[in-house]
Image (cartoon, helix red, strand yellow):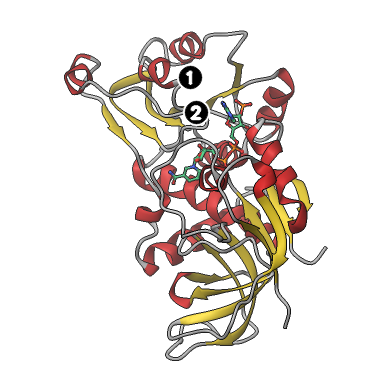
Amino acid sequence: MTNMAAVIHEKGAPDVFRWEEWPVGDPGPGEVLIRHGAIGVNMVDAYHRGGVPHPAKVPDLPTVIGLEGAGTVEALGEGVSEVQVGDRVAYIFGPHGAYSQSRLYPAERCYKLADEISFEQGAAMSLKGLTAWYLIRRVYAVQPGDVVLVHAASGGTGTFLCQWLNAIGAITVGTVSTPEKAEIARSNGCHHPVVRSEQSFVDVVKEVTDGKGVPVVYESIGKDTFLDSMDCLARFGIMACYGHSSGPPPDVNVVDLGRRGSVFVTRPGLNDYTYHREDILRGAADLMDAVTNHGVDIAINQRWPLREVAQAHAALESATTTGSTVLLPFE
Ligand SMILES: NC(=O)c1ccc[n+]([C@@H]2O[C@H](COP(=O)([O-])OP(=O)(O)OC[C@H]3O[C@@H](n4cnc5c(N)ncnc54)[C@H](OP(=O)(O)O)[C@@H]3O)[C@@H](O)[C@H]2O)c1
């Protein structure tokens, strides 16, 4: 079987991807062969390709990156009991290699997709949706009536956060870069969209919370927003600095955390919050329940053939995408 993939031979700008034959082989012990129906695109992929500096390791070059996909299990390696041939599955993280028509992958990190969820939805929702899950269920357990701050509120993860927070009954202040994105955020359940160049999100948070601040900031922009985000925290508030799309944030002065009201700063990672199979299954069950029963909609706003992944990366890095982006491997 000929397998094609978007291969990188050097790190750099989006045009480093090359559409090439990439042999897959048979699954080893604990592995499955997955034929992709759709592949997810995430900001972290751009870091791995060679964009913003990031501590994550990338395999030796040439390589195939990508950490999110959905498809059909076509073959099992020795000892696999978690899934069967023919199962529809999705996955996040684990070894790189999603930007390929088919791939080998550890069975223990796969979860089965509910019948009503398509491959495109599975590829669009798994990484961003499970990130939203651990942020609002585990980093800070959001309660109805909480006011929270979400950055990049019309983006992939931001859209999930706004929708899910709204379903819980929380009030979201969400920042974006343009008035058009503010409308998209509003339509996804963000109560107070703020265009950062037009209005101070610190002022809006203070106004909405009567000066108290928020119990949690979901901070994904980093360098450009981090210090102002710190000014939004309530006493004991949590700064969940889960991404840095504009570049790494400044160093944190620990003594300053006390002065600000015994606040917490964490740099949470999906790989830790889904380290154990039970976590993946628990998170995926919650996510699929939110999608099928509680109105969390998967906004797939961009689709590209996998062979044109360079365009998807350029769009994501120039902040022109909204919601989720998927790649179609056989178009
Ligand atoms: N730690 C984890 O577990 C984890 C998991 C998933 C994602 N993440 C991180 O979460 C962030 C969001 O990921 P995503 O895939 O959902 O991306 P995304 O939000 O769809 O896209 C990034 C958004 O960041 C904003 N942004 C601000 N400054 C930017 C800049 N200089 N360059 C590009 N974008 C900029 C843009 O929104 P505006 O135009 O509205 O500003 C842009 O749309 C990323 O930093 C990612 O690495 C972390």
Q: Is residue 124 above or below residue 194?
A: below
Q: Residue furthest bottom?
A: 78
* Residue 307 can be seen, yes or no: yes
Q: Label 2: which residue? A: 221
Q: Nearer the viewer, residue 90 or 103?
A: 103
Residue shown at the point (56%, 86%) measured from the top left:
26
Looking at the rendered structure, the secondary structure element under dot 1 is: loop
Residue shown at the point (71%, 30%) measured from the top left:
184
Ligand 1 near label 1 (Cβ, under 8 Å)? yes
* Residue 224, numbered label: 1
Location of the N terminus by quadrant is: bottom right
Q: Is residue 184 above or below residue 33?
A: above
Residue 179 position within the rendered picture, expressed as x and y whole percent measured from the top left: 71, 18
Name the residue type under label 2: Ile
* Mark 1 vs 2: CB contact within 8 A: yes
Residue 100 position within the rendered picture, expressed as x and y whole percent measured from the top left: 66, 66
Name the residue type under label 1: Asp
